[in-house]
Image (tube, coloured by chain):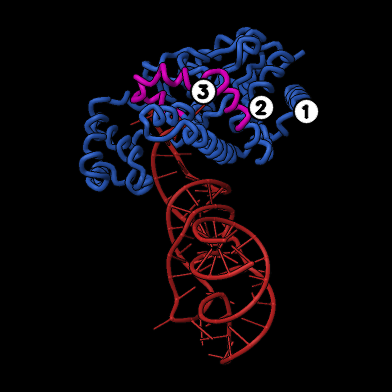
Chain colours: A blue, B red
Amino acid sequence: MLHNTKKLLISISGPTASGKTAASLQLAKHFNTEIISCDSRQMYREMKIGTAVPDKKELAQCSHHFIGKLSIHDYYNASMFEIDITNLLKTLFNKHNIVIMTGGSGMYLDAVLYGIDKIPDPDMNIREALTQRYNNEGLEPLRFELRKLDPDCYEHIDKKNHKRVIRALEVCLSTGKPFSSFHTRTPKKRDFDVLLIGLNKNRTLLYHDIDTRIDNMLEKGLEEEARKLYPHKGLVPLKTIGYTEFFRYFDKEISKEQAIQLIRKNTRQYARKQINWQKRYKVMHWFEYNKTQEIIHFIEQEVQS
RNA sequence: GGUACCAUAGCUCAGUUGGUAGAGCAACGGACUGAAAAUCCGUGUGUCCCUGGUUCAAUUCCAGGUGGUACCA
């Protein structure tokens, strides 16, 4: 039995197809607890197949949170996720000493672990106007304006990344204060401990398993799911691997075979970006993807010490 | 069997009037504070098919070989 007074959040990280779902289910059953999904796409209920949500059997094995919670028509972001999850954790920690969180969205994980600085909600009209300007005039004028409004931010920002520049400008314009003035650069304190677990799978096997997973999605009807969502293809949640490629096929821009090959390629690149992101956590404990018993043993040792 | 053309990066192909080579895609590495499965940045990884000849120097020119493609038999 666990005698710790402080509650523990166990985060399972790893690239797509590394076995996070299976591992977290085993952990949840072993510790008799619940699972929170830290995945920026599995939370949309219309996108089940393409985001590889756990199947009915898996979902029935323990309580899952945040899967299919939103509609693709809802606006959502990492800051909202931070608030929702910290609130949810308060409830769950009343029932459990340990809670599992699993998923591949690095920024959402950061939001839960360290928090995101409080900034007034984005003004969509300003964002829209800036995006228009970017489309018409290019990035240069926006960069120039940012240099005027927030020289400090301009120093550090990725100047070729239009989304970053637009975001910074949008905050400057809607708040009247420099974007950089909102950044505290200090992680928030949480009243629970965190144990970061990373799943490791060698690249060759990972790529093989990605292909298998995509074959499964196609069998389950990914094309049909994508076709249903095609009318909404402009929505942000649908800018997602597995859907955008099919949308291009529906637009007759590429063949179906090309779309599937693109899904494979883009998923591999996505996995690499996830691996890259996960390297930033110096306190991550790495395990081979199929060694859940070792993870359980490790957690029990950590809890007792 | 004969003739012509081709052989350069993982793939498709440039190129070197002879001084050991570069694009796209792929691959790989990285950044990330309210769009993050998004967005952006960086890196060339090579027996220039093989053997011989000419030359100070051959991936480049010449000869032969091997493989491929097309056409003729």
In the rendered image, the quadrant that contains the N terminus of chain A is top right
Give the residue pinned by disc 2. A19
Whether residue A227 appears in magenta in the rendering, the answer is yes
Give the residue pinned by disc 1. A294
Q: Amino acid at mark 2?
A: Gly
Q: Is residue A117 visible?
A: no
Residue B2, above or below A26 = below
**Quick one: label 3 or label 2, which is nearer the N terminus?**
2
Residue drawn at x 64%, y 25% is A20
Q: Amino acid at mark 1?
A: Glu
Q: Amino acid at mark 3?
A: Gly
How many marks can you see? 3
Q: Position of residue B40 (x, y in %)?
A: 39, 45
Q: Residues within 10 Å of mark 3 (few under 14, many from 20)?
A: many
Residue drawn at x 63%, y 16% is A99
Give the residue pinned by disc 3. A50
Discs 3/1, front: 3
Residue drawn at x 55%, y 23% is A218
Residue A80, picture quadrant:
top left
Q: Chain letter for mark 1, please.
A: A
Q: Chain letter for mark 3, please.
A: A
Mark 2 and 1 residues: CB-CB less than 8 Å, in contact?
no
Question: Which stretch appears magenta?
Answer: A211-240
Q: Is residue A56 visible?
A: yes
